[in-house]
Amino acid sequence: MQLIVRDLYLKKMKMNLKNNVMISTRRVISMAKEKVVKTNAMRILDSKKVNYEMIIYESKDGKIDGISVAHKIGIDEANVFKTLVAQGTSKELYVFVIPVAEELNLKEAAVITGEKKIEMIHVNDIMKYTGYIRGGCSPIGQKREYKTFIHESAKELDFIIVSAGKIGYQIKIDSKDLIKIINGTFADIIHK
């Protein structure tokens, strides 16, 4: 397998062929004729000089849910986070970033946002509000900067994995860097 380095600043590259995953540090790499493109989220991180790793996984099998992605990339589910978008009774939108195996506690979400009630937006509206599609919704680089909450378990982890804004692409990042970039808040927002 031939690797073509597309960036002069490439510092390291790891390949996990068992899980059909390619990982690179803050850089873009192409495998054979497949061109790996940078997503808006990656461009934002690069422009702010934030360290991250891009992880690419095979998505042709249609298994793009967070738990399947965690297994494909060989990373503990506790480190892989999903991005959820919800709307309060005030019609304000909020973003919640939680571990893939967990469920958002809508009552807690309402309390921390000061809303009377919070409901998930319809899957068909994700693109309209965020610019991303289901399975590729990143907390970074959405159409607008929504109030964003990351589950507090992320504070204790060395890194978390979030969507890079495109199905098949993930970003490995320090949660403290992510919270600064998205101007977010750590909160207890999952069911216990």
Image: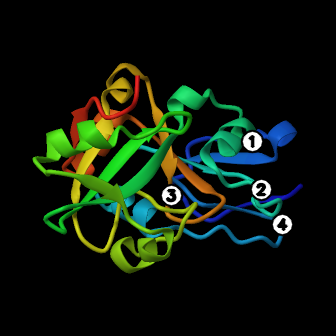
Q: Are marks 4 and 2 in contact (CB under 8 Å)?
A: no
Q: Earlier in the sequence, mark 2 or mark 1?
A: 2
Tell which tag, 4 or 3, sits nearer the viewer.
3
Give whichever of 125, 130 is nearer the camera: 125
Q: Residues within 10 Å of mark 2 (few under 14, many from 20)?
A: some
Q: Are marks 3 and 1 in contact (CB under 8 Å)?
A: no
Please name the residue that numbered disc 1 is placed on: 72
Compute the Cα span from label 3 to label 1. 16 Å
Residue 2 in percent (x, y) is at: 85, 58
Compute the Cα span from label 4 to label 1. 21 Å
Q: Residues within 10 Å of mark 3 (few under 14, many from 20)?
A: many
Q: Which residue is at the far right?
A: 1
Assign the C terminus to one quadrant of the image: top left
Q: What's under tag 1, amino acid-wise?
A: Lys
Q: How many marks?
A: 4
Q: What's under tag 4, amino acid-wise?
A: Ala
Q: Which residue is at the far bottom?
A: 128
Compute the Cα span from label 4 to label 3. 22 Å
Q: Which residue is at the far left?
A: 114
Local secondary structure at mark 1: helix
Q: Earlier in the sequence, mark 3 or mark 1?
A: 1
Local secondary structure at mark 4: loop
Q: What's under tag 2, amino acid-wise?
A: Glu
Please name the residue that numbered disc 2 is placed on: 58
Q: Are marks 4 and 3 in contact (CB under 8 Å)?
A: no
Please name the residue that numbered disc 3 is placed on: 164
Please name the residue that numbered disc 4 is placed on: 32
Residue 81 in percent (x, y) is at: 48, 41
Local secondary structure at mark 3: loop
Residue 177 in percent (x, y) is at: 30, 40
Q: Are marks 2 and 1 in contact (CB under 8 Å)?
A: yes
